[in-house]
Amino acid sequence: MKIVHGYFSPNGETKKIANIFYDELGGKLIDLTYPQSRVDHRRVNADLYILSLPVYSQNIPRPLRKFLIHIKAPFVFINLTYGGFSYGNVLFKIKKQLRVSRVVGYTVSPVKHAYIDQNLTIDKSAFDSSIKKLQSNILEEIHIPYRFNHIFASLFEKSRTRHKFKLNVNLNMCTQCNICIKECPTGSITQSIKILDSCISCEHCVHVCPENAITSKKSFLLKHYLKKNQKTSVIVR
């Protein structure tokens, strides 16, 4: 069986889950975090595609929405990660985007939230039953129930994000090393270090800038939201 593992992971947490499955099942590992990779791997064929991606504001990350329709595999297994607050109806949305593929299982894992300074340990044993099922090669389609997400999850997505989260660039500190430009998962940083509207607020540029020239500012409402209790249990199906 030809297995392909594709993951989108700007903050590295989803990659950890993808690597657990790759180490146990083998196959081909593809990093879909960067724009060119998503272009290069649109036509990859597989018998089983293991898709690992994070939830962004109860939605599929914008860069992956058009990519998902290009996945050519009869069977897909989904590893969904989120910050421990709510993953909304994303599994159902992914299933609709996949079109011809059959979803044979999924995991939903709380991981380190991109906006919170915390250390969360990922328990690899939580995925044992899923890995054993995939190793058995007995793949049967499962039902993904519709879940209600937040009423505004799909409305004014970009404007809501800009209102809650803003990136600031200090050009006096910038040395034009261009690391942020090369590393941006959406290609949203110009040569003059201007943040474009296509930014998904993943904060990857904040973490890779060696001069700390890029900082983020969170709204009062977002800070309050991030104080809620986070879920810790992994869901396996």
Image (spheres, rainbow, N blue to C red):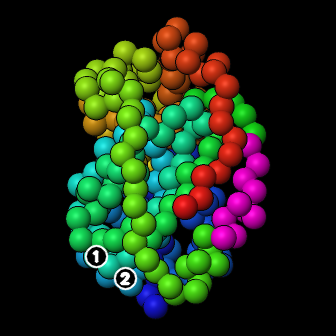
Quarter placement of the C terminus: bottom right
Residue 125: within the magenta? yes
> In the rendered image of this protein, does residue 22 appear above or below residue 58?
below
Q: Residue at x 65, y 51 (%)?
A: 234
> In the rendered image of this protein, does residue 66 appear above or below residue 87?
below
Tell me the kind of residue under disc 1.
Lys
Is 34 left, or right, of 84 in this rendering? Answer: left
**Residue 65 point in image, percent of width and height:** 28, 51
**Residue 85 point in image, percent of width and height:** 56, 32
Task: Say whether marks 2 and 1 touch (CB < 8 Å).
Answer: yes
Q: Residues within 10 Å of mark 2 (few under 14, many from 20)?
A: many
Q: Residue furthest top?
A: 220
Tag on residue 24?
Answer: none
Spatial separation of the CA atoms under disc 2 and disc 1:
6 Å
Span highlighted in magenta in the image: 120-129
> In the rendered image of this protein, does residue 68 appear above or below residue 181?
below
Tag on residue 72?
Answer: 1
Residue 142 picture quarter: bottom left
- Residue placed most toward the observer, 1 or 29: 1
Tell me the kind of residue under disc 2.
Ala
SS assignment at label 1: loop
Tag on residue 46?
Answer: 2
**Residue 36 point in image, percent of width and height:** 32, 61
SS assignment at label 2: loop
Quick one: label 2 or label 1, which is nearer the N terminus?
2
**Residue 177 point in image, percent of width and height:** 47, 42
